[in-house]
């Protein structure tokens, strides 16, 4: 459907643009001195209202002859033909209007006065039609740009979602690989613990599989996943793992990426507590700061212990997932501070109700 006729407000705005056009046409008709102001207005106003609707047809010719896919000669031929037809119809309507008005006592003889002005009306009609063509080409270009931007935005969102799913898919296999290695080691030293670890690992995996295609989950659910993860690890490390949590109650319904914090806790266990004979602690702090939520995961570690590997999946995964979802609105940093390794992240608050 025609974009102007699609909305009543647009139509009213479009017709209001023709008000000064009608005033200009009335001025031109009266410039010769043959007609007075009342006669020029009674002709110009209805003629401009009529021609405003005639010029709407230019949109259809612009649609079928896109400016970037049509040769210059075809463009000129198509729109010149349209302008001639539209202007010819306008002249015929003008003659009929002048003839009808001349039958009334108030405007008797107006048709004779108007006849010398027909070339002016014809030329004005051609000019107005071409102005309409130019306007519609500008509108179509703007519309095409908006559609292109929408397609780019949609593609960007799809790519971001695909990246988030791929990064999320890395978490479980990484943890599963480590857990299976631990179970393998326990089978030779403590079969009972190995069986217990299998049961707890199964429970953790069942919870993570329950996440399905969720893009975000409440922080409270993420904390529950961390507790399930630690239950698995405590089979191996026992009382050597001590977890401390300071969580702002207002943050429990904040939405976070699934398995966002679990890799950080796993990293604390693998690279911190696992290297300490006496064990160690993990401190999780969550607080709301205005429109952001700030989270820190700290653990003690032996700075003199040789690194188990150059770099791990966990920290890189968390950084990439935050960037993929929040862009520059999220921050992520980690650094050792003496015998404490600290990871901090901050991102915009999304509430469960908003989901």
Image (cartoon, rainbow, N blue to C red):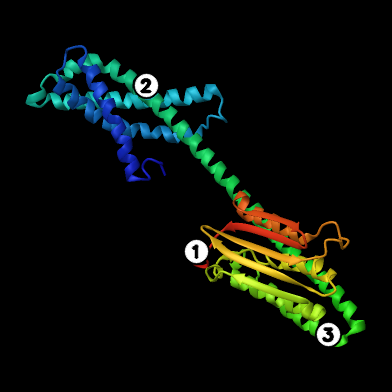
Q: At 32% across and 45% down in the image, what residue appears?
A: 8
Residue at 65% from the left image edge and 66% from the top image edge: 258
Q: Using the rendered image of the protein, determine whether residue 166 is visible from the camera's viewpoint.
A: no
Q: For marks 3 and 2, give the CA distance.
A: 90 Å
Mark 2 or mark 1: name the one nearer the start of the chain. 2
User: Dot 3 lies on which element?
Assistant: helix
* Closest to the observer, 14 or 317: 317
Using the image, tell me which numbered label, if any, was put on residue 158. Answer: none
Q: 273 or 224: nearer the eye?
A: 273
Q: Is residue 139 left or right of residue 322?
A: left
Residue 334 place in picture, x, y as percent: 72, 56
Q: Quadrant of residue 237?
A: bottom right
Circle 3 residues within 10 Å: few <14, some 14–19, many ≥20: some
| Front tag of 2 and 1 | 1
Side of 226 relative to 177 (left or right)? left
Mark 1 → mark 3, Cα distance in angstroms: 43 Å
Residue 270 vertical placement versus 189 (above, below) = above
**Residue 224: percent from left, percent from top:** 65, 75
Residue 109 percent location from the top left of the image:
12, 19
Which residue ends up furthest to the left in the rendered image?
Answer: 105
Quarter of the image for the N terminus: give it. top left
Bin the neighbour count of mark 1 within 10 Å (Cα to Cα): few under 14, some 14-19, many 20 and up.
few
Residue at the front extreme, as displayed: 338
In the rendered structure, find residue 127 and report the number of the disc placed on it: 2
The tag on residue 354 is 1
Circles 3 and 2 in contact, beta carbons < 8 Å: no
**Position of residue 198 in the picture relative to residue 146 (left or right):** right
User: Alpha carbon of mark 2 to alpha carbon of mark 1: how far?
Assistant: 53 Å
* Residue 20 visible (yes or no): yes
């Amino acid at each position: 459907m025609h974009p102007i006729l699609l909305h009543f407000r647009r139509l009213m705005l479009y017709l209001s643009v023709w008000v000064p056009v009608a005033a200009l046409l009335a001025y031109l008709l009266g410039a010769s001195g043959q007609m007075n102001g009342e006669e020029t207005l009674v002709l110009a106003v209805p003629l401009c209202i009529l021609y405003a609707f005639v010029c709407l047809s230019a949109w259809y010719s612009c649609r079928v002859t896109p400016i970037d896919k049509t040769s210059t000669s075809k463009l000129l031929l198509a729109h010149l033909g349209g302008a001639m037809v539209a202007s010819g119809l306008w002249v015929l309507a003008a003659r009929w209007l002048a003839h009808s008005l001349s039958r009334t006592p108030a405007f008797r003889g107006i048709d004779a006065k108007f006849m010398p002005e027909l070339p002016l009306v014809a030329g004005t009609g051609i000019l107005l039609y071409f102005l309409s063509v130019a306007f519609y080409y500008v509108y179509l270009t703007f519309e095409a740009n908006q559609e292109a931007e929408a397609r780019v935005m949609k593609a960007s969102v799809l790519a971001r979602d695909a990246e988030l799913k791929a990064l999320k898919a890395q978490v479980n296999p990484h943890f599963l690989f480590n857990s299976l290695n631990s179970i393998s080691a326990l089978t030779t030293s403590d079969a009972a613990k190995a069986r217990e670890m299998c049961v707890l690992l199964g429970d953790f995996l069942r919870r993570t599989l329950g996440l399905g295609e969720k893009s975000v989950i409440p922080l409270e659910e993420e904390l529950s996943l961390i507790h399930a993860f630690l239950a698995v690890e405590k089979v191996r490390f026992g009382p050597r793992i001590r977890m401390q949590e300071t969580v702002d109650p207002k943050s429990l319904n904040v939405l976070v990426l699934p398995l966002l914090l679990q890799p950080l806790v796993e990293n604390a266990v693998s690279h911190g507590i696992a290297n300490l004979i006496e064990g160690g602690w993990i401190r999780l702090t969550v607080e709301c700061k205005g429109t952001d939520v700030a989270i820190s995961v700290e653990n003690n570690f032996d700075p003199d212990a040789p690194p188990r590997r150059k770099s791990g999946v966990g920290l890189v995964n968390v950084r990439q997932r935050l960037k993929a979802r929040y862009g520059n609105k999220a921050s992520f940093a980690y650094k050792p501070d003496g015998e404490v390794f600290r990871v901090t992240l901050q991102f915009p608050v999304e509430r469960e109700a908003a989901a």
